Amino acid sequence: MNRRNFSSACLAVPTSLWLLAVEQAHALSLGDLSSADASGGVKAALEKGATVAVSLLGRPDGFLGNPKVRIPLPGYLEDGSKVLRMMGQGARIDELVTAMNRAAEQAVPAAKDLLVNAVRTMSVTDAKGILTGGDNSVTQFFAGRTRAPLTERFLPVVTAATLKVKLADKYNQLAGKASGFGLVKKEDANIQRYVTGKSLDGLYLMIGEEERKIRQDPVGSGSAILQKVFGALR
């Protein structure tokens, strides 16, 4: 390709995409930082983030008291609950919502070992993908590695907790009918699976938030490898 054609090709690339490519190339090289250091830093950040997230969510009011992850009734049933409240059934609705969130709080501690194992066995390619990825790169990594096994681990805990609430059976009956009319997603038509799914969503969200805090303030993490890796990206 001659110089004129090369220049024309460069101009054809949107500026935003060009800058993104340059930033990613810099992030992958990280100056004098080795791939081992970069991978080690990401692993340390994610393991710390996972541990902190589990401790924050796996306690009383971890879900119920946190508006970012608090589990509500799904769409149509949340709207329908307003009518029930007007009919004097507010206490029963509150009992169900509280039970749903308490179930999530009880289930989350069971996730720690799987999350930590997912981090410790991640590849250098995985680490680079997270290091240079977008805001949801952490969520995608953990969901891909742990959602299926954690669903099976959470479900019995959630089921045992929600069965104590009489309205849970009513929920499944109403949600099953609403699902048939397309008013509730099929995966939300069973309260146990709905709560399990929302528990995992909340867990991954909080891990991502903790990881972003480390990116923003690596010095405050108190870890030499985290300071070295994420400090190099600043």
Image (tube, rainbow, N blue to C red):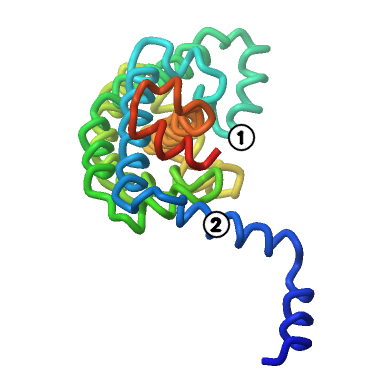
Q: Say which quarter of the image contains residue 79.
A: top right
Q: Position of residue 145 (x, y in %)?
A: 31, 49
Identify which residue is drawn at 38% across, 33% down.
226
Q: Which residue is mark 2?
A: 24
Q: Position of residue 91 (x, y in %)?
A: 52, 7
Identify residue for label 1.
75
- Residue type, mark 2 in image: Gln
Q: CA distance from mark 2 to mark 1?
A: 39 Å
Q: Is residue 221 visible?
A: yes
The residue tagged with tag 1: helix, strand or loop?
Answer: helix
- The amino acid marked with disc number 1 is Gly
Location of residue 13 by image quarter? bottom right
List the single residue furthest toward the bottom: 1
In the picture, the quarter occupied by the C terminus is top right
Looking at the image, which residue is at 41% across and 40% down?
Answer: 229
Q: Residue at x 45, y 14 (%)?
A: 98
Location of the N terminus (image quadrant): bottom right
Query: Is residue 141 or residue 129 the one in the foreground?
Result: 129
Q: Is residue 207 above or below residue 136?
A: above
- Front residue of 173 and 57: 57
Residue at 59% x, 49% y: name it. 182
- Horizontally, residue 56 falls left or right of residue 117, namely right
